[in-house]
Amino acid sequence: MSKAEWDRVPVVITFAERLRMVETYGFAGSQGQTVLEGQRLVPRGKASDTVFLFMHPATTLNMLPMPTALADAGLHVLCAGSRYAKNDSALIMEKVVYDLGQYVRYAREALGYRKVVLVGWSGGGSLSLFYQAQAEHPTITATPAGDPYDLKEAGLQPADGIIFIAAHLSRAETLTEWLDPSVRDELDPDNRDPALDIYAADAPNKPPYATQFVATFRTAQLARNRRITARVRELLDRFAHLKDGEVERGFVVHRTNCDVRWLDPAVDPNGRKPGWCFLGDPRIANVAPAGLARFSTLRSWLSQWSYDHSNAKGTVNAARITSCPVIQIVNGADDAVPATHNPAIRAALATKDKEYVEIDGATHYYLGQPAELAQCIATVTDWSRRKGLLE
């Protein structure tokens, strides 16, 4: 099958927003303007009433295999960047939902698409669920830090369908399952509990891990997330009491890619290879600058990373979606998304129009996997046509 010819067309959306403080560096943010930048992948000479809209909270997706493969297949694609694209240190999930709403509206009202299908890849999966839940049944009027941010009055337009692909439960839950529980002092990452330090050469617990050790490990990970959250709230309360002009602070979260799954393929098994993750060697990823939540602000932690406070948790939002068809595409050898996450979403989805497809052997990015990628694209186009989302 020949590939369609297509063009990359820039998309720029600008709107004014009154903010209490500047979160992103640059002219636009400091002058009360929010600027969103995206790309349309538009097949030449082939009009369409449907656009497949990709958005991730913290990055752009226009170079990933799936968006370009959809364009190769002759479908219209919009890859949307949030206001925090490529820098999630101050990211507020509620504002990302608002940004996604601007793209949905723009796609319909400015670009003329009648149908908008959200494609939630990786971290975009829980974002898509969060967005649709608030579009169908808006509830949020403030961020987890208590800052006013009204999604009930945002006029979010529901999407016509959701493709949840290679996606996890949420950033908060995934980070919690990857936090290194051996860290005892957040200011001194070398102060570690040897019993929980699975990457140490002399680690007392080695794969295959005992069930009790895995349970202890998970409990310690959650406890660490909650310790950081407690410190965040303590600082925010202090700033509110002092009223001296300081309202925010940045901090480093050390060692954030530590999971027994990476070393023991028998823990929540799928087709991934042991000793590896989507970022490469997990021992290196654990301390690399690109680790999840490596740099964060207080407010961003509560909105994006706090297990107990984030509004973006996948199962919570899935249970609020009632009027939208959803398909989950699970990559059978995903080396990023834990195997337990998609079944949890499947069970939580309230919509009766839901499907679940697994692609055997597919990794997170389909790197070097043209057959698996082709199966994914065929699944998307078949589902979209059956649901009346694509002619």
Image (tube, rainbow, N blue to C red):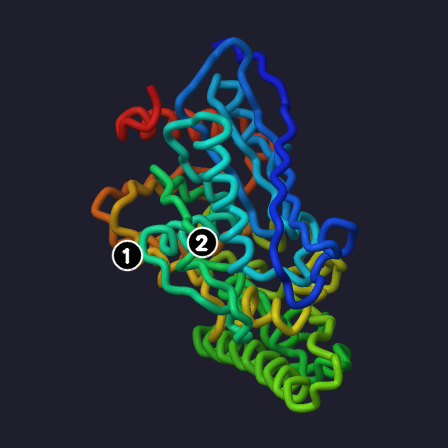
Q: Please tell me whether mark 2 sits on a helix, a strand or a loop.
A: loop
Q: In the drawing, does residue 138 fall left or right of residue 290?
A: left
Seen from the viewer's position, the closer of residues 342 and 332 is 342
Q: Amino acid at mark 1?
A: Ala
Of the two numbered discs 2 and 1 on the same chain, state the one appearing first in sequence. 2
- Image x and y of residue 50, in percent: 41, 26
- Image x and y of residue 234, in percent: 62, 87
Label 2 Cα neighbours within 10 Å, binned few <14 / some 14-19 / many ≥20: some
Seen from the viewer's position, the closer of residues 350 and 334 is 350
| 32 over 176 or under it: above or below | above
The residue that mark 2 highlights is 154
| 74 over 229 or under it: above or below | above
Q: Please tell me whether mark 1 sits on a helix, a strand or a loop.
A: helix
Residue 198, picture quadrant: bottom right
Q: Let me know if residue 272 appears in the view.
A: no
| 123 over 204 or under it: above or below | above
Dot label at residue 347: 1
- Image x and y of residue 326, in percent: 32, 42
- Image x and y of residue 57, in percent: 57, 51
Q: Let me know if residue 34 appears in the view.
A: yes
- Cα separation between marks 2 and 1: 29 Å
Circle nearer the viewer, 2 or 1: 2
Q: Residue at x 48, y 69 (%)?
A: 142
